[in-house]
């Protein structure tokens, strides 16, 4: 009798424990990529109150919505550790990023950011954002604020003021500092200045990301400088959008990756990020000698080109860069993108422009056109000067994170680099599935748990019980980028759902402007509260 009674009690207890649960969302029968590089497995996932549940999801459980579609895979939302979020106040919905699976983006790269991050991030929080947003504090912006476009070392007072602004940025929520040592005015900053500011960042637990001083000729010295900063400032470092640009440097990634690996072996925390394309995108002024723009990118430049001797030196510097650096040795490799002065040339090359002007399309005449562009407030250009072999080599590197370097873009607005629409689907579909450069699980790791770890995010980037519900549901057989250099405004295919903080913002190709993103704050934020 007692035994029967005990059995009845146990049965009631089991039934009670196994009672159906009710969730916000259940995603059934999907191939699960956990973000850690593990082999995918089939299973189901539930979401309740912006938390992921993986265990004990029963066929009897219910949800407000159930997704059950054959052949789909799920992964953590992609974390873009190098994103140009400058237009986010105009395009807060960030649809171009979301449609390629991005759920979190780190802004303020290449040395450029708002100076008053507290005010800026609070404004974003009030207006709402489509994706989770994090920020770096930019060295170029800080240096310009304190010194303008001066080609000299800072005084002790100026360096102190810059350190104060950097520290304020960290307390306001920055995840670290970025530099753009190829750009003005960062190109004039010496190593000791960068180390001093990096130490301030390190003391607040932040990271250092760097557009290297050179990515073509001088690449090895640029990589070594970043490694030296990691050592002397005791700070984690990311070599941002790592590449070997210009024909003379093709094949150099073997050496740069070894430099990074050796630095890590010696105890330094150095990594790289990369976009999966053979062309870069930046201002046309990158072809112009920096000394010609001291004091002003346009007015002082215009004054100097009036002097025949200075103009000749400027022109020869441009010719050198066309032949040996971003120009790739051919005017056809320089594709005009944003060009307010001559919008009809957007998408055309410097070669096309020369032909239109009725001049021989050689480097000397190309240099003259670059001067004309700068005199008319500049332009942006796409530079087709990266080796496909280097792209694949860097991508396979164990310390490489995938990032877009893309700008938040309105559909069919301007002539952007295709990376703004295609970065993450391109790596998964083209490089992993179609070419086998790396496995799909490794590709996903490079855009989820690895960038999350770099930023110190403890609740995103992994498909794990209790983590935030940032998720991407895709068809592993169909996922692919569609944007091209000739026709960039094309959304990718094969990404059916994107979920941000538990809200479905992309559903079977239909975008929902829910602004469900959060503003993420860096490690120094609590100290500044």
Image (cartoon, grey):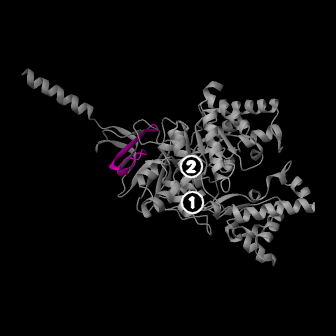
Q: Residue at x 70, y 66 (%)?
A: 334
Q: Which residues are magenta?
A: 30-51
Is 307 left or right of 10, judged from the image as shown? right
The residues bearing labels 1 and 2 have C-alpha atoms spaced at a distance of: 18 Å
Q: Is residue 420 left or right of residue 285?
A: left
**Residue carrying label 2:** 273
**Residue 249: image x %, image y %?**
62, 59
Find residue 143 and report its image quarter: top right
Question: Camera-side residue: 182 or 112?
Answer: 182
Q: Which residue is the extreme one toward the right?
A: 307
Q: How many marks?
A: 2
Q: Position of residue 144 (x, y in %)?
A: 79, 42
Q: Is 512 situated above or below 465?
A: below
Q: Tell me if 309 is positioned left or right of 495 in this view.
A: right
**Crowding near pointer 2: few (<14 within 10 Å), some, many (20+)?**
many
> Any mark on residue 251, and which?
1
Q: Quadrant of the N terminus?
A: top left
Identify the secondary structure beneath mark 1.
loop
Q: Is residue 85 visible?
A: yes
Residue 254 in the image: state x and y as whole percent. 54, 54
Residue 138, relative to residue 73: is it above or below? Answer: above
């Amino acid at each position: 009798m007692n035994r029967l009674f005990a059995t009845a009690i146990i049965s009631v207890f089991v039934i009670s424990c196994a009672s159906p649960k009710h969730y916000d969302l259940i995603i059934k029968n999907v191939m699960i990529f956990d973000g850690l590089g593990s082999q995918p497995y089939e299973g189901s996932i539930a979401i309740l109150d912006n938390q992921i549940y993986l265990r004990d999801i029963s066929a009897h459980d219910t949800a407000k919505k159930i997704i059950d579609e054959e052949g789909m895979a799920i992964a953590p939302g992609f974390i873009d550790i190098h994103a140009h979020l400058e237009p986010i106040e105009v395009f807060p919905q960030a649809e171009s990023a979301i449609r390629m699976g991005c759920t979190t983006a780190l802004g303020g790269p290449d040395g450029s950011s708002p100076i008053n991050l507290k005010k800026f991030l609070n404004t974003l929080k009030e207006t709402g954002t489509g994706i989770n947003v994090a920020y770096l504090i930019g060295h170029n912006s800080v240096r310009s604020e304190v010194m303008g476009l001066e080609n000299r070392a800072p005084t002790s007072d100026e360096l102190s003021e810059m350190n104060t602004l950097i520290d304020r940025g960290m307390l306001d929520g920055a995840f670290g500092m970025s530099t753009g040592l190829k750009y003005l005015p960062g190109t004039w900053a010496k190593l000791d200045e960068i180390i001093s500011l990096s130490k301030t960042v390190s003391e607040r637990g932040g990271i250092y990301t760097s557009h290297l001083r050179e990515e073509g000729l001088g690449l090895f010295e640029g990589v070594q400088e970043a490694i030296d900063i990691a050592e002397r400032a005791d700070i984690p470092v990311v070599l941002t959008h790592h590449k070997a640009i210009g024909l003379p440097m093709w094949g150099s990634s073997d050496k740069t990756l070894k430099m990074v690996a050796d630095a890590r072996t010696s105890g330094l925390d150095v990594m790289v990020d990369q976009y999966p394309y053979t062309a870069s995108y930046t201002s046309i002024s990158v072809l112009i000698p920096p000394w010609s723009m001291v004091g002003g990118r346009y007015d002082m430049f215009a004054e100097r080109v009036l002097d025949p001797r200075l103009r000749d030196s400027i022109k020869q510097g441009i010719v050198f860069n066309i032949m040996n650096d971003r120009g790739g040795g051919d005017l056809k490799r320089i594709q005009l993108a944003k060009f307010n002065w001559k919008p009809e040339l957007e998408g055309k090359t410097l070669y096309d422009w020369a032909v239109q002007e009725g001049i021989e399309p050689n480097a000397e005449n190309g240099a003259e056109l670059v001067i004309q562009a700068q005199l008319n407030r500049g332009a942006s250009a796409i530079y087709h000067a990266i080796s496909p072999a280097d792209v694949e080599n860097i991508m396979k590197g164990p310390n490489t994170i995938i990032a877009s370097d893309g700008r938040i873009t309105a559909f069919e607005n301007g002539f952007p680099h295709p990376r703004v629409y295609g970065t993450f689907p391109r790596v998964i579909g083209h490089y992993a599935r179609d070419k086998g450069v790396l496995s799909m699980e490794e590709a996903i790791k490079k855009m989820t748990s690895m960038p999350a770890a770099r930023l110190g995010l403890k609740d995103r980037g992994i498909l794990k019980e209790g983590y935030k519900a940032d998720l991407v549901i895709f068809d592993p057989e169909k996922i692919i980028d569609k944007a091209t250099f000739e026709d960039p405004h094309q959304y990718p295919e094969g990404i059916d759902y994107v979920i941000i903080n538990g809200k479905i913002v992309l559903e079977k190709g239909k975008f929902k402007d829910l602004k469900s993103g959060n503003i993420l704050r860096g490690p120094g934020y609590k100290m500044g509260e």
